[in-house]
């Protein structure tokens, strides 16, 4: 939507905020480069790729994808639009790190050290659509959808934990950018975790932010359907979800809906076991604080942990709060909550596995003051995320420190020696694996 159309709808102040937001995040449209190596892997003492196997040693990092984007044509390759659809298109996103000149040895060095060389570009080469499932179609009705889930299950069978991580990108995003971000996540899990990217129809422009908000709302039902399909047709031991920025506007209401979707006679525990939702991680979540709190009540007991990592200086969420006239949970303003909401959030942070993680630029070396993309831009934050996804470690086990807010809420911070703590977290896991392999070889 162009500025001349936005102006009468937003008013001068909100339009100015949106324009400033565009300027602040214009760098987001630069090429995606290999993210800084997580601090836990920088010394070479812990090699995340040691167990990956030679077949995964290469610069290609394919990830699975599901999209609810509409398409103007289906064959030979779909041409996707920014319009939401009830149809789910599934396939493989073929992503490559660097160009053909980059070899595995160089990529491995860059991924296991604090090498100062320029990071290679991560780019989507092509989308291989495998299936197109209509709103009223079941997987049993589609041979192609069955083939997609067979591929997913094959990938899970060859992974160490058999966990599935679903990545939900934010606004101002294109399909290539979202696929590249998902590939980064898979790469730095040592390529041992299966990653699926939900490519919802972001318009890829900050000036179309409110188009994205509408499209995110229209993507809730398709995402609910995706989670139900994965729970029913995959052999994932558990399902993790990483929601970035406006991706929270899809994930949180979808989980709230699933939390109220028990079948007749199905207990809460049976619902939890059926869906197998494990860790839900919100990074710089762009969703109304009050709305998030109300939705959290419906699913916080249905998952293992809910993490909310936020930078209180986040410039993107600062301006999002202005244009939406409400604070975002990724930049929490507790004064907006009523007494009941505040009490629930405090109880959730202490008793229900809801972890508030303070991403403080003054405590984390070299973290940009107004960072919005900290989950993949910062080596400390990415290490903490990987400690959760790879080792299922609680915040205190990952090296974070517990703090108490003025109203009694618990939150977690990065201590000055976090880099040393998180390295120690991964060492026992590596040593245990070495001992196990030695025992099997005898």
Image (cartoon, rainbow, N blue to C red):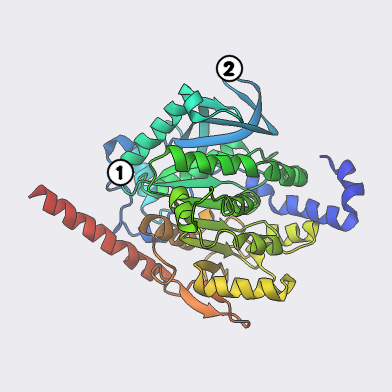
Q: x and y percent of residue 50 in the render?
A: 27, 48
List the single residue furthest toward the front: 265
Q: Is residue 41 left or right of residue 230?
A: left
Name the residue at 61% across, 39% down.
222
304 in relation to 334, above or below? above
Label 2 or label 1, whichever comes before in sequence order: 1
Q: Is residue 36 visible?
A: no
User: Tag 1, which secondary structure?
Assistant: loop
Question: Dot 2 surroundings within 10 Å: few (below 14), some, or many (20 or more)?
Answer: few
162 in relation to 418, above or below? above
List the single residue furthest toward the right: 8
Instruction: State the separation of the CA atoms marked 2 and 1.
Output: 35 Å
Nearer to us of marks 2 and 1 is 2
Residue 183 or 212: which is nearer the viewer? 212
Q: x and y percent of residue 418 in the render?
A: 42, 70
Q: Is residue 376 visible?
A: yes
- The residue indicated by pointer 2 is 75
Name the residue at 52% across, 57% down.
281
Tell me, for residue 52, which label it has, or none. Answer: 1
Name the residue at 42% across, 30% down.
100
Q: x and y percent of residue 340 in the render?
A: 68, 73
């Amino acid at each position: 939507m162009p500025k001349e159309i936005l102006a009468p709808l937003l008013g001068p102040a909100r339009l100015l905020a949106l324009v400033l937001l565009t300027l602040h995040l214009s760098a987001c449209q630069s090429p995606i480069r290999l993210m800084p190596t997580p601090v836990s892997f920088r010394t070479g003492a812990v090699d995340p790729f040691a167990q990956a196997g030679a077949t995964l040693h290469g610069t290609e990092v394919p990830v699975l994808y599901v999209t609810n984007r509409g398409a103007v044509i289906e064959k030979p390759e779909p041409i996707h639009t920014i319009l939401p659809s009830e149809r789910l298109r599934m396939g493989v996103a073929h992503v490559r790190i660097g160009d053909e000149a980059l070899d595995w040895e160089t990529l491995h060095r860059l991924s296991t050290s604090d090498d100062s060389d320029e990071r290679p570009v991560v780019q989507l080469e092509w989308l291989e659509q495998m299936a197109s499932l209509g709103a009223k179609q079941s997987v049993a009705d589609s041979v192609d959808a069955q083939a997609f889930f067979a591929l997913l299950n094959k990938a899970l069978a060859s992974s160490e934990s058999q966990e599935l991580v679903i990545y939900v990108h934010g606004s101002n995003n294109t399909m290539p950018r979202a696929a590249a971000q998902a590939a980064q996540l898979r790469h730095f899990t040592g390529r041992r975790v299966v990653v699926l990217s939900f490519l919802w129809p972001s318009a890829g422009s900050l000036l179309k932010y409110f188009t994205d908000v509408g499209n995110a709302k229209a993507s809730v039902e398709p995402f609910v359907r995706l989670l139900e399909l994965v729970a029913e047709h995959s052999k994932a031991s558990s399902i993790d979800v990483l929601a970035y920025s406006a991706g929270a506007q899809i994930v949180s209401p979808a989980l709230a809906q699933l939390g109220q979707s028990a079948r007749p006679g199905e207990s809460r525990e049976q619902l939890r076991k059926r869906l197998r939702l494990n860790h839900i991680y919100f990074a710089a979540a762009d969703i109304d604080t009050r709305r998030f709190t109300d939705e959290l009540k419906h699913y916080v007991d249905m998952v293992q942990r809910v993490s909310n990592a936020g930078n209180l200086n986040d410039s993107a969420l600062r301006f999002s709060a202005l244009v939406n006239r409400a604070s975002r949970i990724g930049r929490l303003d507790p004064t907006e909550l009523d007494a009941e909401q505040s009490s629930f959030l405090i109880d959730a942070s202490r008793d229900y596995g809801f972890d508030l993680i303070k991403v403080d630029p003054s405590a984390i070396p070299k973290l940009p003051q107004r960072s919005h993309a900290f989950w993949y831009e910062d080596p400390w934050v990415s290490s903490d995320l990987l400690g959760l996804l790879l080792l299922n470690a609680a915040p205190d086990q990952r090296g974070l420190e517990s703090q108490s807010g003025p109203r009694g809420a618990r939150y977690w911070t990065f201590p000055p020696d976090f880099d040393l703590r998180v390295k120690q977290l991964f060492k026992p896991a590596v040593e245990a694996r070495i001992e196990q392999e030695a025992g099997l070889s005898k």
